[in-house]
Amino acid sequence: MTTSLRDISKHFKVNVSTVSRALSDDKRISEKIRAEIKSYAAQVGYKPSPLRRKIKNTLALVIYTDEEGKTDDYYQLEIIRRFSLVVSRHKKNISLEFLRRNSSSIIPSAITENRVDGLLLAGHPPLEICRKICTEKIPAVILSDSLARTGCSCINPDFSHGTEEAVSKLIHKGRKRIAMVLSNLDFPTVKARYDAFIKALADRKQTLIPELIMPNFSPDIRGGRTAVQALLKRQERPDAIIFINDYMAGGGIMELQKNGIRLPEDISISSYDNTIISAELSPSLSSVESNLEGILEEAYQMICAQMKNKERAPEEKLFSTQLIVRESI
Protein backbone atom coordinates (compact mmCIF):
# COMPACT_ATOMS: atom_id res chain seq x y z
CA MET A 1 0.00 0.00 0.00
CA THR A 2 1.35 3.41 -1.03
CA THR A 3 1.92 6.01 1.67
CA SER A 4 0.53 9.46 0.84
CA LEU A 5 1.20 12.97 2.15
CA ARG A 6 -2.13 12.73 3.96
CA ASP A 7 -1.01 9.54 5.74
CA ILE A 8 2.13 11.26 6.95
CA SER A 9 0.18 14.36 8.04
CA LYS A 10 -2.16 12.15 10.12
CA HIS A 11 0.81 10.46 11.76
CA PHE A 12 2.25 13.81 12.87
CA LYS A 13 -1.16 15.47 13.37
CA VAL A 14 -0.26 18.40 11.12
CA ASN A 15 -1.60 19.85 7.85
CA VAL A 16 -0.71 18.25 4.52
CA SER A 17 0.92 21.54 3.51
CA THR A 18 3.25 21.30 6.52
CA VAL A 19 4.39 17.84 5.43
CA SER A 20 4.85 19.04 1.86
CA ARG A 21 6.96 21.99 2.97
CA ALA A 22 9.05 19.84 5.30
CA LEU A 23 9.82 17.36 2.52
CA SER A 24 10.84 20.21 0.19
CA ASP A 25 13.12 21.58 2.94
CA ASP A 26 11.12 24.77 3.40
CA LYS A 27 12.87 26.83 6.09
CA ARG A 28 9.47 28.02 7.37
CA ILE A 29 9.20 24.61 9.04
CA SER A 30 11.51 24.09 12.03
CA GLU A 31 14.65 22.04 11.43
CA LYS A 32 13.56 19.47 14.05
CA ILE A 33 10.13 18.88 12.46
CA ARG A 34 11.66 18.75 8.98
CA ALA A 35 14.14 16.10 10.09
CA GLU A 36 11.45 14.00 11.80
CA ILE A 37 9.08 14.13 8.83
CA LYS A 38 11.82 13.32 6.31
CA SER A 39 13.04 10.41 8.45
CA TYR A 40 9.53 8.98 8.80
CA ALA A 41 8.83 9.43 5.07
CA ALA A 42 11.98 7.47 4.22
CA GLN A 43 11.06 4.81 6.76
CA VAL A 44 7.60 4.19 5.26
CA GLY A 45 8.88 4.42 1.68
CA TYR A 46 7.01 7.57 0.68
CA LYS A 47 7.48 8.60 -2.97
CA PRO A 48 5.99 11.78 -4.51
CA SER A 49 3.30 11.13 -7.10
CA PRO A 50 4.09 12.37 -10.63
CA LEU A 51 2.15 15.49 -11.50
CA ARG A 52 0.06 14.21 -14.39
CA ARG A 53 -1.20 10.93 -12.90
CA LYS A 54 -4.74 12.24 -12.47
CA ILE A 55 -6.42 15.23 -14.08
CA LYS A 56 -7.11 17.93 -11.47
CA ASN A 57 -8.75 20.48 -13.80
CA THR A 58 -6.55 23.10 -12.12
CA LEU A 59 -3.55 25.17 -13.22
CA ALA A 60 -1.11 26.91 -10.90
CA LEU A 61 0.23 30.43 -11.29
CA VAL A 62 3.50 30.71 -9.36
CA ILE A 63 4.79 34.28 -8.90
CA TYR A 64 8.36 34.88 -7.71
CA THR A 65 8.85 38.21 -5.92
CA ASP A 66 11.29 40.08 -3.71
CA GLU A 67 8.87 39.92 -0.78
CA GLU A 68 6.82 36.79 -0.14
CA GLY A 69 3.10 37.33 -0.64
CA LYS A 70 3.58 40.75 -2.26
CA THR A 71 3.76 41.50 -5.98
CA ASP A 72 6.77 43.42 -7.26
CA ASP A 73 4.72 45.75 -9.43
CA TYR A 74 1.42 46.38 -11.17
CA TYR A 75 2.46 44.18 -14.11
CA GLN A 76 2.41 41.10 -11.87
CA LEU A 77 -1.05 42.05 -10.65
CA GLU A 78 -2.14 42.22 -14.28
CA ILE A 79 -0.69 38.75 -14.90
CA ILE A 80 -2.74 37.39 -12.01
CA ARG A 81 -5.93 39.11 -13.13
CA ARG A 82 -5.68 38.24 -16.80
CA PHE A 83 -4.48 34.64 -16.39
CA SER A 84 -7.35 34.04 -13.97
CA LEU A 85 -9.72 35.24 -16.72
CA VAL A 86 -8.09 32.97 -19.30
CA VAL A 87 -8.25 29.90 -17.06
CA SER A 88 -11.85 30.54 -16.00
CA ARG A 89 -12.85 31.06 -19.63
CA HIS A 90 -11.70 27.50 -20.25
CA LYS A 91 -13.74 26.33 -17.23
CA LYS A 92 -10.72 25.37 -15.14
CA ASN A 93 -9.59 26.38 -11.66
CA ILE A 94 -6.51 28.36 -10.74
CA SER A 95 -4.14 27.98 -7.78
CA LEU A 96 -2.05 31.05 -6.90
CA GLU A 97 1.26 30.81 -5.06
CA PHE A 98 3.87 33.44 -4.14
CA LEU A 99 7.50 32.53 -3.44
CA ARG A 100 10.61 34.61 -2.81
CA ARG A 101 13.21 34.60 -5.56
CA ASN A 102 15.96 33.67 -3.12
CA SER A 103 14.05 30.58 -1.92
CA SER A 104 15.53 28.34 -4.60
CA SER A 105 15.30 25.22 -2.42
CA ILE A 106 11.55 25.60 -1.86
CA ILE A 107 9.53 23.61 -4.39
CA PRO A 108 6.12 25.15 -5.15
CA SER A 109 3.50 23.33 -3.12
CA ALA A 110 1.43 22.89 -6.30
CA ILE A 111 4.12 20.42 -7.38
CA THR A 112 4.87 18.70 -4.09
CA GLU A 113 1.21 18.25 -3.23
CA ASN A 114 0.37 16.98 -6.73
CA ARG A 115 -2.77 19.12 -6.98
CA VAL A 116 -2.52 20.79 -10.41
CA ASP A 117 -2.18 19.73 -14.05
CA GLY A 118 0.38 22.35 -15.05
CA LEU A 119 2.02 25.64 -14.13
CA LEU A 120 2.60 29.16 -15.37
CA LEU A 121 5.61 30.75 -13.66
CA ALA A 122 6.50 34.45 -13.63
CA GLY A 123 9.01 36.69 -11.90
CA HIS A 124 12.35 35.07 -12.88
CA PRO A 125 12.07 31.65 -11.12
CA PRO A 126 15.25 30.10 -9.67
CA LEU A 127 17.17 27.72 -11.94
CA GLU A 128 16.83 24.90 -9.39
CA ILE A 129 13.05 24.99 -9.86
CA CYS A 130 13.40 25.16 -13.66
CA ARG A 131 15.64 22.08 -13.64
CA LYS A 132 13.12 20.14 -11.55
CA ILE A 133 10.33 21.05 -13.99
CA CYS A 134 12.43 19.85 -16.94
CA THR A 135 13.64 16.67 -15.24
CA GLU A 136 10.16 15.60 -14.13
CA LYS A 137 8.55 16.73 -17.42
CA ILE A 138 5.99 18.85 -15.62
CA PRO A 139 3.74 20.82 -18.00
CA ALA A 140 4.90 24.39 -17.48
CA VAL A 141 5.50 27.69 -19.25
CA ILE A 142 7.61 30.55 -17.94
CA LEU A 143 6.50 34.08 -18.73
CA SER A 144 9.05 36.69 -19.85
CA ASP A 145 12.11 34.47 -19.60
CA SER A 146 14.33 32.52 -21.98
CA LEU A 147 14.65 28.90 -23.04
CA ALA A 148 18.43 29.37 -22.93
CA ARG A 149 18.38 30.30 -19.22
CA THR A 150 15.65 27.99 -17.94
CA GLY A 151 15.56 24.99 -20.28
CA CYS A 152 11.76 25.27 -20.08
CA SER A 153 9.12 26.50 -22.51
CA CYS A 154 8.91 30.31 -22.38
CA ILE A 155 6.70 32.98 -23.90
CA ASN A 156 7.64 36.65 -24.24
CA PRO A 157 6.57 39.94 -25.73
CA ASP A 158 8.90 40.89 -28.60
CA PHE A 159 9.57 44.53 -27.81
CA SER A 160 11.46 45.25 -31.04
CA HIS A 161 8.60 46.66 -33.11
CA GLY A 162 6.94 48.71 -30.35
CA THR A 163 10.27 50.18 -29.24
CA GLU A 164 11.24 51.03 -32.81
CA GLU A 165 7.96 52.88 -33.22
CA ALA A 166 8.55 54.85 -30.01
CA VAL A 167 12.13 55.81 -30.90
CA SER A 168 11.10 56.73 -34.46
CA LYS A 169 8.29 58.97 -33.21
CA LEU A 170 10.63 60.74 -30.80
CA ILE A 171 13.30 61.28 -33.45
CA HIS A 172 10.65 62.57 -35.86
CA LYS A 173 9.71 65.13 -33.20
CA GLY A 174 13.34 66.30 -33.15
CA ARG A 175 14.35 64.57 -29.90
CA LYS A 176 18.08 63.80 -29.72
CA ARG A 177 18.77 63.27 -26.02
CA ILE A 178 16.59 60.27 -25.23
CA ALA A 179 16.83 58.90 -21.68
CA MET A 180 15.68 55.46 -20.53
CA VAL A 181 14.54 54.73 -16.98
CA LEU A 182 14.88 51.07 -15.97
CA SER A 183 14.22 48.82 -13.02
CA ASN A 184 16.34 45.67 -12.48
CA LEU A 185 18.28 44.74 -15.63
CA ASP A 186 18.73 41.19 -14.32
CA PHE A 187 15.08 40.53 -15.17
CA PRO A 188 14.76 39.25 -18.77
CA THR A 189 11.73 41.41 -19.61
CA VAL A 190 13.58 44.58 -18.50
CA LYS A 191 16.74 43.57 -20.38
CA ALA A 192 14.67 42.85 -23.51
CA ARG A 193 13.20 46.37 -23.45
CA TYR A 194 16.63 47.91 -22.92
CA ASP A 195 18.20 45.85 -25.75
CA ALA A 196 15.37 46.86 -28.10
CA PHE A 197 15.98 50.52 -27.23
CA ILE A 198 19.74 50.26 -27.91
CA LYS A 199 19.09 48.53 -31.25
CA ALA A 200 16.45 51.07 -32.28
CA LEU A 201 18.89 53.92 -31.66
CA ALA A 202 21.70 52.17 -33.56
CA ASP A 203 19.45 51.33 -36.52
CA ARG A 204 18.59 55.03 -36.83
CA LYS A 205 22.21 56.13 -36.38
CA GLN A 206 21.37 57.93 -33.15
CA THR A 207 23.99 58.36 -30.43
CA LEU A 208 23.46 56.51 -27.16
CA ILE A 209 24.15 58.88 -24.26
CA PRO A 210 25.33 56.68 -21.35
CA GLU A 211 24.59 59.28 -18.67
CA LEU A 212 20.91 59.16 -19.68
CA ILE A 213 20.57 55.40 -19.03
CA MET A 214 19.04 55.16 -15.54
CA PRO A 215 18.98 51.55 -14.21
CA ASN A 216 17.92 49.97 -10.91
CA PHE A 217 15.02 52.19 -9.85
CA SER A 218 12.00 50.67 -8.10
CA PRO A 219 9.35 49.71 -10.68
CA ASP A 220 6.66 52.02 -9.30
CA ILE A 221 5.57 55.65 -9.06
CA ARG A 222 8.25 56.42 -6.48
CA GLY A 223 10.96 54.97 -8.73
CA GLY A 224 9.81 57.13 -11.63
CA ARG A 225 9.92 60.28 -9.51
CA THR A 226 13.36 59.47 -8.11
CA ALA A 227 14.79 58.77 -11.57
CA VAL A 228 13.49 62.10 -12.90
CA GLN A 229 14.98 63.93 -9.93
CA ALA A 230 18.36 62.44 -10.90
CA LEU A 231 17.90 63.28 -14.58
CA LEU A 232 17.07 66.91 -13.83
CA LYS A 233 20.42 67.24 -12.07
CA ARG A 234 22.30 66.34 -15.26
CA GLN A 235 24.28 69.15 -16.86
CA GLU A 236 22.27 68.62 -20.04
CA ARG A 237 18.73 67.44 -19.50
CA PRO A 238 17.04 64.87 -21.75
CA ASP A 239 14.45 66.03 -24.26
CA ALA A 240 12.66 62.65 -24.15
CA ILE A 241 12.33 59.86 -21.58
CA ILE A 242 11.28 56.24 -22.12
CA PHE A 243 10.17 54.55 -18.90
CA ILE A 244 10.21 50.79 -18.44
CA ASN A 245 6.55 50.73 -17.31
CA ASP A 246 3.52 53.00 -17.07
CA TYR A 247 3.62 53.46 -13.29
CA MET A 248 7.21 54.68 -13.37
CA ALA A 249 6.16 56.99 -16.21
CA GLY A 250 3.27 58.28 -14.11
CA GLY A 251 5.66 59.15 -11.28
CA GLY A 252 8.03 60.77 -13.75
CA ILE A 253 5.26 62.92 -15.21
CA MET A 254 4.30 64.11 -11.72
CA GLU A 255 7.90 65.07 -10.94
CA LEU A 256 8.43 66.86 -14.25
CA GLN A 257 5.22 68.87 -13.85
CA LYS A 258 6.19 69.71 -10.27
CA ASN A 259 9.35 71.30 -11.68
CA GLY A 260 7.43 73.37 -14.23
CA ILE A 261 8.45 71.31 -17.24
CA ARG A 262 5.90 71.27 -20.08
CA LEU A 263 4.91 67.93 -21.56
CA PRO A 264 5.42 67.17 -24.37
CA GLU A 265 6.74 70.60 -25.42
CA ASP A 266 9.92 70.45 -23.30
CA ILE A 267 10.22 66.70 -22.77
CA SER A 268 8.36 63.89 -24.55
CA ILE A 269 7.44 60.72 -22.64
CA SER A 270 6.90 57.11 -23.70
CA SER A 271 6.47 53.88 -21.76
CA TYR A 272 5.60 50.17 -21.84
CA ASP A 273 2.60 47.91 -21.03
CA ASN A 274 -0.30 50.23 -21.99
CA THR A 275 -2.04 49.65 -18.67
CA ILE A 276 -5.32 51.25 -17.69
CA ILE A 277 -3.64 54.39 -16.30
CA SER A 278 -2.06 55.30 -19.68
CA ALA A 279 -5.15 57.00 -21.07
CA GLU A 280 -6.01 58.61 -17.70
CA LEU A 281 -2.76 60.49 -17.10
CA SER A 282 -2.42 64.11 -18.15
CA PRO A 283 -0.98 64.30 -20.72
CA SER A 284 -2.21 60.84 -21.76
CA LEU A 285 0.70 58.44 -22.00
CA SER A 286 2.09 56.89 -25.18
CA SER A 287 2.86 53.27 -24.31
CA VAL A 288 3.94 50.02 -25.98
CA GLU A 289 1.11 47.48 -25.89
CA SER A 290 2.49 44.04 -25.00
CA ASN A 291 -0.72 42.08 -25.72
CA LEU A 292 -0.57 40.40 -22.32
CA GLU A 293 -3.95 38.70 -22.64
CA GLY A 294 -2.99 37.15 -25.97
CA ILE A 295 0.30 35.98 -24.49
CA LEU A 296 -1.44 34.35 -21.52
CA GLU A 297 -3.98 32.61 -23.76
CA GLU A 298 -1.10 31.18 -25.80
CA ALA A 299 0.69 30.16 -22.57
CA TYR A 300 -2.45 28.27 -21.54
CA GLN A 301 -2.52 26.45 -24.90
CA MET A 302 1.18 25.57 -24.57
CA ILE A 303 0.60 24.05 -21.12
CA CYS A 304 -2.34 22.02 -22.45
CA ALA A 305 -0.20 20.75 -25.34
CA GLN A 306 2.43 19.55 -22.85
CA MET A 307 -0.26 17.84 -20.79
CA LYS A 308 -1.26 15.82 -23.88
CA ASN A 309 2.34 15.02 -24.82
CA LYS A 310 4.82 14.90 -21.96
CA GLU A 311 7.70 14.34 -24.43
CA ARG A 312 7.01 17.62 -26.25
CA ALA A 313 10.25 19.57 -26.70
CA PRO A 314 10.55 22.92 -24.85
CA GLU A 315 9.93 25.95 -27.06
CA GLU A 316 10.15 29.72 -26.93
CA LYS A 317 7.47 31.94 -28.46
CA LEU A 318 7.43 35.69 -29.11
CA PHE A 319 4.47 38.07 -29.42
CA SER A 320 4.79 41.30 -31.40
CA THR A 321 4.18 44.67 -29.72
CA GLN A 322 3.00 48.06 -30.97
CA LEU A 323 3.11 51.65 -29.75
CA ILE A 324 -0.17 53.27 -28.74
CA VAL A 325 0.42 56.97 -29.47
CA ARG A 326 -1.10 59.55 -27.13
CA GLU A 327 -0.47 63.14 -26.04
CA SER A 328 2.85 62.57 -24.21
CA ILE A 329 4.69 62.33 -27.56
Image (cartoon, grey):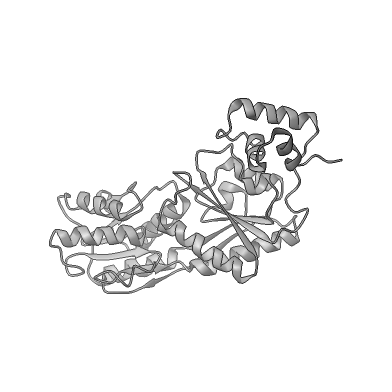
Above or below, comparing residue 68 to residue 168 in the picture? above
Residue extending furthest toward the right? 1
Instruction: Work out whether 104 lies above or below 317.
Output: above
Tell me the residue at 50%/42% (across/down): 101
Residue farthest to the front, as pictured:
13
Q: Give the x, y percent position of residue 147.
A: 59, 52
**In percent of the image, x 33 and y 66: which residue is there?**
167
Q: Quadrant of residue 139?
A: bottom right
Question: Image quadrant for the C terminus?
Answer: bottom left
Where residue 316 sits, quadrant-wise, is bottom right
Task: Give 253 or 86, whichever is nearer the viewer.
Answer: 86
The x, y position of residue 302, in whole percent, is: 64, 63
Instruction: In the rendered view, tell whether residue 14 sits above or below residue 257.
Output: above
Quadrant of image for the N terminus: top right
Q: Residue furthest left?
A: 260
| In-front residue for pair 129/203 | 129
Q: Horizontal placement of 97 versus 37: left or right?
A: left
Residue 297 x/y as whole percent: 58, 68
Residue at the spot x=36%, y=50% of the render?
A: 183
In this view, the residue in front, 171 or 255, is: 255
The number of numbered discs placed on residues in the rendered structure image is: 0
Quarter of the figure with residue 328: bottom left
Question: Residue 187, position in %: x, y?
Answer: 45, 49
